[in-house]
Image: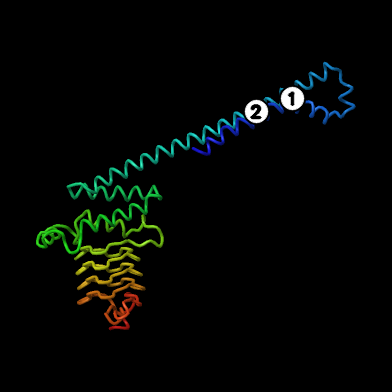
Amino acid sequence: MKRLTVLVPLIVVVAGALAVACVVFAPAWIISHDLGVGGRSALSAVDRLKAVNDVRSTLMQGLAAVVALGGIALGAVMTLRQIRVHREGQFIDRFTKAIEQLSGDHVGTRMGGVYALEQIAEVAPHYRGHIAALLASFVRQQAPWPPSRPMQEVDAERQRYHGGLRDDIGGAMAALGRRAMIPSGVGIELEKVDLRGADLSGQDLSGFCFADSNLDDAILAGCDLSNTTFTGASLRNADLTGAVLVGADFADSGLEGIAGIGVTPAELDLAAGHATTRAEGQAEAHP
């Protein structure tokens, strides 16, 4: 808007200057340039006036065409700006409604909010970082560890859903695992979350932080866990078959009964707290 405020007066001034030049200065100069001083002197006053008027008329027609094109271009810019403003308003409206859905009382409503946010992230790149942070916060609030409700109640609820997670929480984890909304090089903070028995197989969780979380019995087979932080997390009986563990941090983690091809506490270098091996392709080395 500031640019247009400056641009419009500037265009008016330039157009006015060109009009004055076309009417006052340019016609006589063009005639003198084309005919020379002698040729111009040979013209009678009537012919010279007619020549000036003809040149002036031609210049004004050309200037009018330029101004018309400029007006069309300016109108197109204004229209495009209005479209962008309208579209941004639609994104804000959809974003607000999706947030309201996340705080709904029903699982289906919250799940719809998760999918709505993922759709917004696909068409509005400037919202992606905010949406990723919002979904991470949603998971932390909806599945805290230790649970904010009685353990028996939480366990009974988990048994009603496939994959070890309530549908809305599972949908949020799946959306984050697809990484379409996560900017390159940005991690996701999921500290102290309850992901016991969660089926997260095949997801890209690289750079995520699961510090002090509970992933007992979780299925992480085929996951990309490179540079993922599991400091203080519990992964008892978790399945890491085929998972990429390069740079993962398992310091002070519980790994009893962990399953996976070639994955052992020794290989994870627990003393240093960093995993330096890859879980896949190690079966021959550890028959």
Say which residue label 2 marks.
Answer: 16
Picture residue at 28% right of the left edge, 43% below the top? 97
Mark 2 near mark 1, Cβ–Cβ under 8 Å?
Answer: no
Q: Amino acid at mark 2?
A: Gly
Q: Is residue 216 left or right of residue 23?
A: left
Of mark 2 and mark 1, the one earlier in the sequence is 2
Q: Quadrant of the C terminus?
A: bottom left
* Label 1 residue SS: helix
Q: Residue 145 sits in which quadrant?
A: bottom left
Q: Residue at x 20, y 56 (%)?
A: 142
Task: Say which element carries label 2.
Answer: helix
- Give coordinates of residue 123: x percent, y percent: 39, 47
The spot of residue 65 in percent (x, y) is: 63, 28
Residue 80 image point, x, y percent: 48, 37
Dot 2: within a 10 Å radius of its alpha carbon, few (fewer than 14), some, or many (20 or more) residues? few
Q: Nearer the viewer, residue 277 or 233?
A: 233
User: How many dots with numbers?
Assistant: 2
Q: Which mark is residue 133?
A: none
The answer to which image quadrant residue 176 occupies is: bottom left
Up/down of 232 relative to 69, above or below: below
The quarter of the displayed image where residue 6 is located: top right
Give the colour scheme shown: rainbow
**Viewer-side residue, 264 vs 269:** 269
Q: Is residue 135 left or right of residue 1?
A: left
Which residue is most to the top? Answer: 46
Q: Is residue 154 left or right of residue 64?
A: left
Q: CA distance from mark 2 to mark 1?
A: 12 Å
Q: What's the residue type where badge 1 is placed?
A: Val
Q: Residues within 10 Å of mark 1 (few under 14, many from 20)?
A: few
Where residue 48 appears, x then y in whole percent? 82, 20
Residue bearing the label numbered 1: 24
